[in-house]
Image (cartoon, helix red, strand yellow):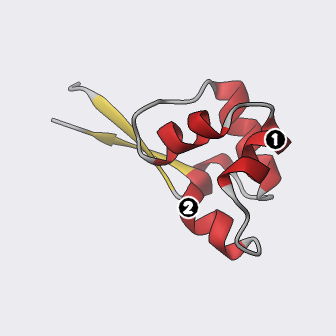
Amino acid sequence: MGKLKITNNIRRLRFDADEMTQKELAERVGVTRQTIVAIENAKYSPTLELAILISRVFDKPLEKVFDIQDAS
């Protein structure tokens, strides 16, 4: 198996959630806004715990928020 890349739908979900800001999401899950920026831009893969917390904020299953793709 090649290198895997985690992608996400956080930006779309924030927009759909009354245009929630990155700061608001960060505060709700206990991280910095910069962490949310890095996750949204696929520069950082969240821990499983953080991924679950983010999916709970949007009341979506984990696989509706995050996806994993073969980057090869």
Residue 25 horizontal side relative to residue 10, left or right? right
The foreground one among 46 and 68 is: 46
Residue 43 horizontal side relative to residue 23, left or right? left
Residues at circles 2 and 1 in contact by the CB criterion of under 8 Å: no
Residue in the picture at 34% in, 36% down: 5
Residue in the picture at 49% in, 30% down: 45
* 18 shown above or below 64: below
The 10 Å Cα crowd at callout 2, few under 14, some 14 to 19, many 20 or more, is some
Residue at disc 2, secondary structure: helix
Real-space Cα separation, disc 2 to disc 1, in angstroms: 16 Å
Question: Which sits earlier in the primary sequence, circle 2 or circle 1?
Answer: 2
* 50 shown above or below 15: above
Query: Nearer the observer, disc 2 or disc 1?
Result: 1
Tag 2 residue: 11
Q: Amino acid at mark 1?
A: Glu
* 64 shown above or below 12: above
Q: Position of residue 53 (x, y in %)?
A: 77, 38
Residue in the picture at 73% in, 64% down: 20
Task: Kindly identify which numbered label has been placed on residue 27.
Answer: 1
Q: Position of residue 51 (x, y in %)?
A: 66, 36
* 61 shown above or below 36: below
Q: Residue furthest right?
A: 28
Task: Kindly identify which numbered label has been placed on residue 37.
Answer: none
Q: Amino acid at mark 2?
A: Arg
Residue in the picture at 65% in, 47% down: 62
Q: Position of residue 60 (x, y in %)?
A: 73, 58
Quadrant placement of the N terminus = top left
